[in-house]
Amino acid sequence: MRLTKLEHAALVIEEAGGELFIDPGKFTRPVPASAAAVAVVITHRHDDHWTPEQLTRIVAAAPEVRIFGPAGVAAAAADFPVETVEAGDSVEVGPFRLRFFGGRHAVIHPSIPVIDNLGVLVNDALYYGGDSFTVPGVAVEVLAAPAAAPWMKISEAMDYVVEIAPRRAFPSHEMVLSPAGKALSNARLAWATEQGGGEYLPLEPGGTIEI
């Protein structure tokens, strides 16, 4: 299984000729859509995690692609055939097994409503929590670790990585950071990964991991 990090929170995973896209949003350049796409996972409705333009591009290239997300995504993306999933659900699609965790977005501020959000575990190896600190409670080989967001501080992300103790971790949700901020975040997340004996990979957009 090959993971390619795109900008911000977007990922594309390739396995056995199929492609899975996760969270192709507005801080990501047009995703490299192809006929190989079998599924899209959108963790929540915020537009830095999905846009109609990105989904239209993927669906045009692969009309049979399946799109998964919580109820809030299905409502926001009503023009697309989103299949609603919930925490505890497991879906087999092409070469991918998707398991969903959590249910709620992290709190940004008491004045801002909390929306639904699902973390996803891909092929029992790669975990991405979306905008949350939901711990899946299973062994994680590779973790997409949040680097910066309005809903977090770096100490929370560090504690999250320490608790999950992945074998490898890389940064996500980092397009809101300056180069100096990315360097600081990478250093802190690397420390947290190493506490569990793991390896931190400071991937830049276009970087890949073999899982």
Image (tube, rainbow, N blue to C red):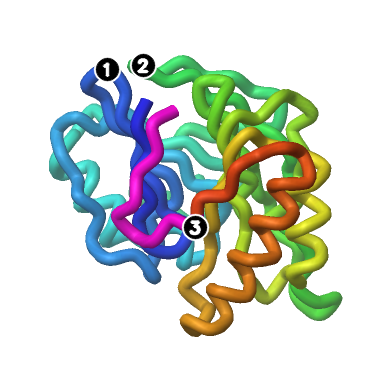
What's the residue at 41%, 54% (across, down)? 10
User: Which residue is more in the foreground, 93 or 32?
Assistant: 32
Label 1 environment density (alpha carbons within 10 Å; few <14, some 14–19, many ≥20):
few
Q: Tell me which corner region of the image, top left, top right, bottom left or bottom right, holds residue 115.
A: bottom right
Residue at the spot of label 2: 95
Residue 110 in sight in this render: yes
> Would residue 155 appear left or right of 146 to someone viewing this image?
right
Q: Amino acid at mark 1?
A: Ala
Q: Where is residue 52 drawn, in percent x and y?
A: 32, 59
Q: Where is residue 168 drawn, in percent x and y?
A: 58, 39
Q: Where is residue 123 drawn, in percent x and y?
A: 51, 21
Q: Amino acid at mark 2?
A: Pro
Q: Which residues are magenta?
A: 202-211
Residue 104 in sight in this render: no
Circle 2 SS class = loop
The C terminus - image quarter = top left
Mark 3 in CB contact with mark 2 (< 8 angstroms): no
Point out the tag, 3 or 2, that comes first from the N-terminus: 2
Label 2 environment density (alpha carbons within 10 Å; few <14, some 14–19, many ≥20):
some
What's the residue at 57%, 80% (across, down)? 181
Residue at the spot of label 3: 202
Check if residue 207 falls in the magenta segment: yes
Residue at the spot of label 1: 16
